Amino acid sequence: MEKESRKDIKRISHSPPHFPFEDPPLTLSMGLLKVSNSDWFEIFDLKERALQLEAKRNFLASIHKDVFMADASALKASIDVLNLMLINLTTYQPDLYSLKNNIIKLKPHKYFEGEEFLTDLNTNGMHPLDLAARLVQEDLLIMLPPNKKQKGWWLAAGSLAFPSRWNLKDKFRKTMDAIHAPVPFYKDELKTPTNNFFNKMPCDDIFARCNWSLHDTPSLRQNRAKPFVEKTGINSKNAGERLWLRVERQTIRKIKKTGAILFTIRIYVDPLKEIVKFEGVAKRLNKALSVLPPEMQAYKQNNTFSDSVRKYLDQF
């Protein structure tokens, strides 16, 4: 049975770092920004970090085959990813990570008892991407370039503990275009620029983007494309209590040695009633909802309660 380790896994303690609502008019683009090595992995709240690492550890222990998958061809890229992450984490987060004698330590603190892993893959028997994903809150996905069998960039390995209404099994070994086939306007407006960017992006530069959606649960692991039904009971009076803002912060990095691309996905979940307290956020979200095309509303599963949410947001 899939369950998180504690009911308070949701993040409510402080200002969320991302409000990625696009102001009108709506434009469809990849929305990428270049970020520094120090910002590759985000840590804003140590309690939240401890809870998410615990939840990930529990999922990997109980449903490992659903959370982690890897094609043999992704092994070299996975080793490179692990080595890059070991350097990055110990360089930019030395208060939380240390590496000595082939042991990576996640240092203890008030909310975290600490953990350590052997980095010698011949000794620990772990897949390098499996190990890498246990070090951070982010989920990790490796895309490999086209080959004789795959006609486009394809998902060759992944550790996905916290999906947003999808599961790894359905997307594993599929191309980028097949993975994004359900996304409105992808084929006509995003397919070509996305593939061109992947083909031409410089190695070791890091790019980030965010997307958002409203969910009726704070659960981190949402591995089913569960649609809302018409009678959700969500209205303009209870929307703040019944809905959560879920933000995905994704980074993209092409690995120099193999030419593989690593996606990281970091999840933030905050109650709607809390985020509206921050200046200007309610108006920005209201405007963003007002310009979403019907196809995108349905894709985000906001269509059954969007009007109610907008009425709720009008109060602020």
Image: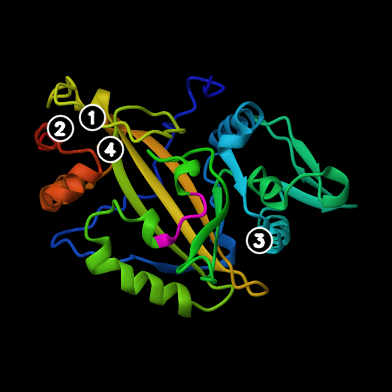
Residue at numbered disc 2: 305
Q: Amino acid at mark 3?
A: Ser
Neighbour class for label 4 at 10 Å: few (<14), some, many (≥20)?
A: many
Front label number (3 vs 1): 3
Binning the other alpha carbons within 10 Å of mark 3 as few (below 14), some (14 to 19) or many (20 upward) gives few
Whether residue 286 is situated above or below residue 313 in the rendered picture: below
Magenta-colored stretch includes residue 174 = yes
Marks 2,3: beta carbons within 8 A = no
Q: Are marks 3 and 4 in contact (CB under 8 Å)?
A: no
Magenta stretch, overall SS:
loop
Residue 193 in the image: x percent, y percent?
A: 33, 74
Question: From this viewpoint, is residue 53 visible?
Answer: no
Give the SS element for disc 1.
loop
The residue that disc 4 covers is 214
| Residue 211 drawn at (x, y percent) | 34, 52
Find the distance from the CA under tag 1 to the CA under tag 2: 9 Å
Question: Which residue type does callout 4 highlight?
Answer: Leu
User: How far is disc 2 from disc 4 in space, using C-alphas?
Assistant: 10 Å
Left or right, 82 with reference to 174: right
- Name the residue at 14% across, 37% down: 306
Do the residues under discs 2 and 4 have CB atoms within 8 angstroms?
Answer: yes
Residue 73's label in the rendered image is: 3
Q: Is 115 located above or below residue 237 in the figure?
A: below
Give, as a three-letter code, the residue at label 2: Phe
